Image: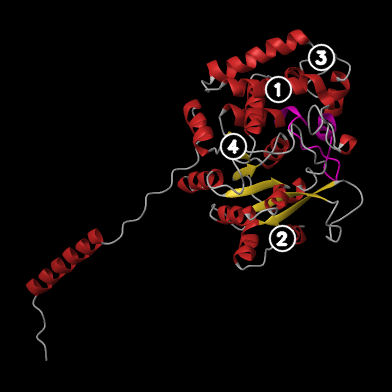
Amino acid sequence: MAERPTRPSRAVAVCVASVLLLALGAAGPRPQAAAEPLPARLSDRVFWQMVTEFSEPGGFFRSDNLVSNESTFQQIIPDLLKKTPRGGVYVGVGPDQNFTYITALAPRMAFIVDIRRQNMLLHLMYKALIETSDDRIEFLSKLFSRERPASLGASATPQDLFDAFGDVPASDALFARNEQALFDWLEKHHGFALSEEDHRAIEYVYRAFYLGGPDLRYSFPQQMGGRWFPTYSELMVETDLEGLNHSYIANEKHFRDLKELETNNLLIPIVGDFGGDKALHKVGEYLREHGATVTYFYTSNVEQYLFQTEAWSKYYTSVGAMPLDQTSTFIRAYFNLRFRSVQSFNAGPRSETLTDPIAPFIGAFRDGRIHTYYDVIERSR
């Protein structure tokens, strides 16, 4: 039978155990430092560093795509607002339809990733015009190089805005003055380093809005698809199925919200191929470092082009490496000219907008259940 320890021996045992526990704690894995949260504002230097370092060399697309060719992209917004939280991160592609999703869904940060460098420069043009405009009317005046109609007030509806601007001719003098102010804002105020080629590309885009005005369509000057595609003004007066307009110029609050995001440098345009090796990976790394999640990924119909090669597999691998959760959602545009067996097909709008939870989709991809673009559309609703 063992002897009962005396009081001094108990004290020694406790001390030895404490030392061992401290040693084990020092030798064992230490908890990782908490991720730094997303910033409330990016400096001009950091913003431009992200634009340049996250970007890939520009690629080719068959159209300028200056405005959207999708007429139904607002219709899924009420459903998204019910099912997904605000305050996440938005990733998108293409021109200003992203602004409508951003102002409606209120992410903390947004990345626009497009294969065309011209699209990144288009967004820099918008950035300058939005940041230097006090309200929607001044913004449209600068966008189209038309004098501000005196009849418009803060409560004007989108239809009021375009009815009024439709009666105002474009001004050569206003175009020249605003274009110079645009470059001064980007280069002197923000300090962004634009090349001569960048200057020419921005001038080309800005002149298209000057010449096309509110009737500008998908591509300029050759309007691909003719009147199949909606004009800028038609897109801005679109609504959801209940008749509510969610566009970024629907009201002054929406415009102010967009202006705040732009002013804080939290809407970051990047040159990148969805099937490439860099842009989406860099966005994913940044979000992981800041403990953030992709809430919305607006793909337009880019996936249709990715399935023309093996790029789709690399794309879904990249998306699967991004920080996701069960609310992360794809937003897709589907043009109903080919896949007429899809359950959501109707004979009305040429485009339809579909959604799909990202995490289950990536699971299906990893399990080998995604092979064609038809598979992608069939599982979207």
| Amino acid type assigned to the residue bearing label 3 in the image | Ala
Residue 233 is one of the magenta-drawn residues: yes
Residue at 60% over, 52% down: 315
Q: Is residue 157 visible?
A: no
The tag earlier along the polypeptide, 1 or 2, is 1
Q: What predominant SS class does the magenta segment belong to?
A: loop
Mark 2 closeness class: few <14, some 14–19, many ≥20 residues within 10 Å? some
Task: Left or right? Give the position of 7 relative to 146.
Answer: left
Mark linked to residue 372: 2
* Residue ranking furthest to the right: 347
| Amino acid type assigned to the residue bearing label 1 in the image | Tyr
The residue singled out by tag 4 in the image is 271
- Disc 3 or disc 1, which is closer to the eye? 1
The tag earlier along the polypeptide, 2 or 4, is 4
Q: What is the span of residues highlighted in magenta in the rendered image?
A: 232-253
Q: Under tag 4, what secondary structure? A: strand
Task: Left or right? Give the position of 289 relative to 317.
Answer: left
* Residue ranking furthest to the bottom: 1
Q: Position of residue 381 (x, y in %)?
A: 77, 57
Q: Nearest the camera: 170 or 241?
A: 170
| Amino acid type assigned to the residue bearing label 4 in the image | Val
| Amino acid type assigned to the residue bearing label 2 in the image | Thr
Q: Quadrant of residue 158?
A: top right
Mark linked to residue 170: 3
The CA distance from mark 4 to mark 1 is 18 Å
Q: Under tag 1, what secondary structure? A: helix
The CA distance from mark 3 to mark 4 is 31 Å
The residue singled out by tag 1 in the image is 204
Q: Is residue 284 visible?
A: yes
- Disc 3 or disc 2, which is closer to the eye? 2
